Image (cartoon, rainbow, N blue to C red):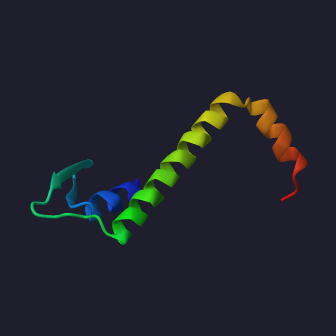
Amino acid sequence: MQLGLQALALLGFEIAYFDHDFEIAEKTGHAGSDAKTTLAIERFLAAAQEEQFRRQYFYQVSLTTIQAIACQQPL
């Protein structure tokens, strides 16, 4: 989530956190299209894709399979 909020800030949004809620507002006159903004967006998208992969993986793989794999690998 932190990467997404950073990307939004670089795109010209103001992010505030009040009482367990986020408030996001667009700053006027901001055009965030530099390399730093592009990198922030790419990092956010990569993190979102990783999260989606993990959710899908743990949804499809049974707990028994995960436990069996964990028992095979020494710590």
The residue under the point 90% across, 47% down is 72
Q: Quadrant of residue 15?
A: bottom left
Q: Please, is residue 20 above or below residue 67 in the view?
A: below
x and y percent of residue 57 in the render?
Answer: 66, 36
Asked if residue 19 shows in the view, the reply is: no
Taking the image as shown, residue 62 lies to the left or right of residue 75, namely left
x and y percent of residue 1 in the render?
Answer: 40, 53
The residue under the point 26% across, 60% down is 11
Taking the image as shown, residue 37 lies to the left or right of residue 29, namely right
x and y percent of residue 17 in the render?
Answer: 23, 55
The residue under the point 61% across, 34% down is 56
Taking the image as shown, residue 59 lies to the left or right of residue 49, namely right
Q: Quadrant of the C terminus?
A: bottom right
Q: Nearer the viewer, residue 56 or 10?
A: 10
Asked if residue 28 shows in the view, the reply is: yes
Q: Nearer the viewer, residue 66 or 5?
A: 5
The residue under the point 58% across, 37% down is 55
Q: Quadrant of residue 7?
A: bottom left
Q: Nearer the viewer, residue 29 or 2?
A: 29
Taking the image as shown, residue 47 lies to the left or right of residue 26, namely right
